[in-house]
Amino acid sequence: MFDNLSDRLESVFKRLKGYGRLSEDNIQEGLREVRLALLEADVNFRVVKDFVARVRERAVGREVMESLTPAQQVVKIVHDELVALLGGRNRQLDLSGRQPAVLLLVGLQGSGKTTTAAKLARWLLSKGRAPYLVPADVYRPAAVEQLRVLGERIGVPVHPTDTSRPPVETAREAVARAGLQGLDTVIVDTAGRLHVDEALMGELRDLKARLEPQEILLVADAMTGQDAVNIAGKFDADLSLTGVILTKVEGDARGGAALSIQAVTGTPIKFVGVGEKLDQLEPFHPERIADRILGMGDVLTLIEKA
Amino acid sequence: ARTRQGFVHQVDELLLGRKEIDPGLLDELEEILVTADMGVATVGKVLEELRIQVKRRELADAGALRERLQDRIRALLPPPGPGPAWAPAPFVVLVVGVNGVGKTTTIAKIARRLQAEGKKVLLVAADTFRAAAAEQLETWGRRLDVPVVRHAAGADPAAVVYDGLEAAIHRGADVVLVDTAGRLHTKTNLMEELKKLRRVIRKKVPEGPHEVFLVLDATTGQNAVSQARLFREAVDVTGIVLTKLDGTAKGGIVVAVSDEMGIPIRYIGIGEGMDDLRPFDPDAFVSALFEREGAA
Ligand SMILES: Nc1nc2c(ncn2[C@@H]2O[C@H](COP(=O)(O)OP(=O)(O)OP(=O)(O)O)[C@@H](O)[C@H]2O)c(=O)[nH]1
Ligand SMILES: Nc1nc2c(ncn2[C@@H]2O[C@H](COP(=O)(O)OP(=O)(O)OP(=O)(O)O)[C@@H](O)[C@H]2O)c(=O)[nH]1
Ligand SMILES: [Mg+2]
Ligand SMILES: [Mg+2]
């Protein structure tokens, strides 16, 4: 992820560097290209607009224009703003409070919820917690079976969900059962749904009200386009998300969804999925990502040599 | 928010009270089209000509703009042509795409359509990788009363395809729909596996696969262009199915994909049920791009 964006930005900065001292025109032109690069990376149109406006305001100031290394200053500003856009620092899961702790995974169809539920279980197991996987998707064919197979693979118990009963009741029972069995972390895998499906969004609001989960995590596909902000915005408005998990980031997606969701909902990205296997989940570090987007290794050395 | 409003509404709002087209108006149109995932490059191309015409005062009437825009976009979509022949039997269709886009569900939907036309369909569960993928297809097979050929989890997909075609020939099936595991187009070993499946098909049915459908998710952004490019390179995609158009995403990405590749779009998916598939209609799609309220 982000490689293409990184390449595009690098060429913009290379050009800026070539100018030596920067005129306001040079900066405007550079920012036009930054804007294009971000749009091509699927960053939401509005987010791009605000981002470019913020960078412009800082870049045409005296600190840059009078600097001996103006291009470097511009890169630094873009870097700072990117880190801010990505949420600043890594945020961990917060499972404190009533036990067993409950995590609710939500999202559109096919985003990777079921796989991520098992990945999280494995991750939490390695952190010394005792997870319980709960299939609450009673709609998709073989959804329960899918989670059962994954749970077996990592040695985590899976609730024997009866698909003829309402998910909310199943989940409540599962939490009670986890408590009795001394399991401290309940991970609820919900059915994929569209954010505009009011009936199914209502089911999630219900689940939230009845389970009082510590974490409500939106599982989102890294390849999502401009609609990411509408989707995340609606899930957040209905459920007050505590985090986002971005999946399928190991491909060549340009990462615009990541930048947009964070910017619009202010919900931190907590993990990224980097493959289909159950150990392919990584904590998300905004700074490292911003460094990678800007190809810091390359761009910074390039500019430092200037 | 603007992005949630329908295109017509937005365009009308823009045009309201403006008899002349100014550059600001075109910028706002750019925003609307980019927000539908058409991609800055494609949008730039579409608007470029209009900008020139505006400058030359050949297009001074704001009212004509919308129509012109619609025509320009429509022209980028390849003509649908006659569509799949579904013959001779066994007519083999390979369905490919990245993870979670809707391949398995689309196969069930296509089977449903063919069944309604009186065709004998057989499904092949060549996704032996994802947990319960074969069970998912089997469930659809039961609902539709269509046979499904599967092996145990972890089996060689090529062997499943071979057996599936054997069964199809033996039972006299008209159409064989092969479900494959989701894979990112950037994973070369997995793309090689697809090529191998195609070779296996040719061993049994020399002119097969007759169609290779690439399934694209309408919520996908610019990455879909890369998906289409690499899947086509690997297995000669003959048609696109655009799923999940029942959300608020406008699926404008297929315009960008068409602009670059010209692969015909065959079907659209508009829900999770087996009847939620429609043949792609370019005119209807473009007007929907312009007309549909965000919350479909
Ligand atoms: N490449 C890749 N594939 C992933 C990742 N996470 C999940 N997947 C794949 O994405 C597809 C969909 O994953 P699921 O876990 O079934 O998604 P879901 O959100 O539960 O789907 P529904 O329940 O149908 O809404 C599967 O093929 C997964 O193997 C990831 O990080 N990388
Ligand atoms: N809303 C909506 N959901 C769809 C549509 N098509 C498929 N889905 C849903 O998307 C999810 C993924 O569908 P699948 O058919 O399992 O996707 P796949 O491409 O086979 O997934 P993998 O095999 O894991 O790569 C399921 O929850 C489907 O019900 C559609 O047109 N609209
Ligand atoms: Mg699921
Ligand atoms: Mg599938």
Image: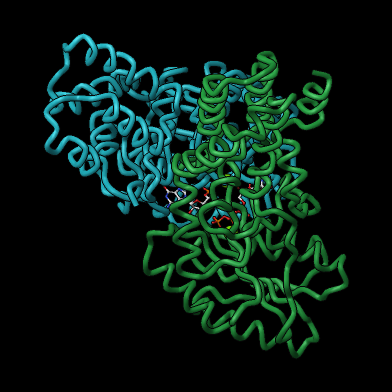
Q: Position of residue A119 (x, y in %)?
A: 75, 58
Q: What residue appears at the point 57 percent right and 25 percent down from the top-left corner? A: A27
Q: Position of residue B234 (x, y in %)?
A: 62, 21
Q: What residue appears at the point 20 percent right and 25 percent down from the top-left corner? A: B21
Furthest toward the top, the residue is B56
Q: What residue appears at the point 63 percent right and 44 percent down from the top-left corner? A: A81
Residue A231 lies, with reference to residue B191, above or below; the image says below
Q: Position of residue A229 (x, y in %)?
A: 47, 50
Number of numbered discs on residues: 0
Q: Is residue B86 left or right of residue A90?
A: left
Q: Is residue B84 left or right of residue B127?
A: left
Residue B208 in sight from this viewpoint = no
Chain cyan in the figure, letter: B
Seen from the viewer's position, the closer of residues B273 and A11 is: A11
Chain green in the figure, letter: A
Seen from the viewer's position, the closer of residues A113 and B32 is: B32
**Which quadrant would residue B66 be assigned to in this image?**
top left
**Which quadrant would residue B155 be assigned to in this image?**
top right
**Which quadrant would residue A215 be assigned to in this image?**
bottom right
Seen from the viewer's position, the closer of residues B296 and A15 is: A15
Residue A188 in sight from this viewpoint = yes
Q: Position of residue B16 (x, y in %)?
A: 14, 38
Seen from the viewer's position, the closer of residues B284 and B116 is: B284
Residue B201 lies, with reference to residue A133, above or below; the image says above
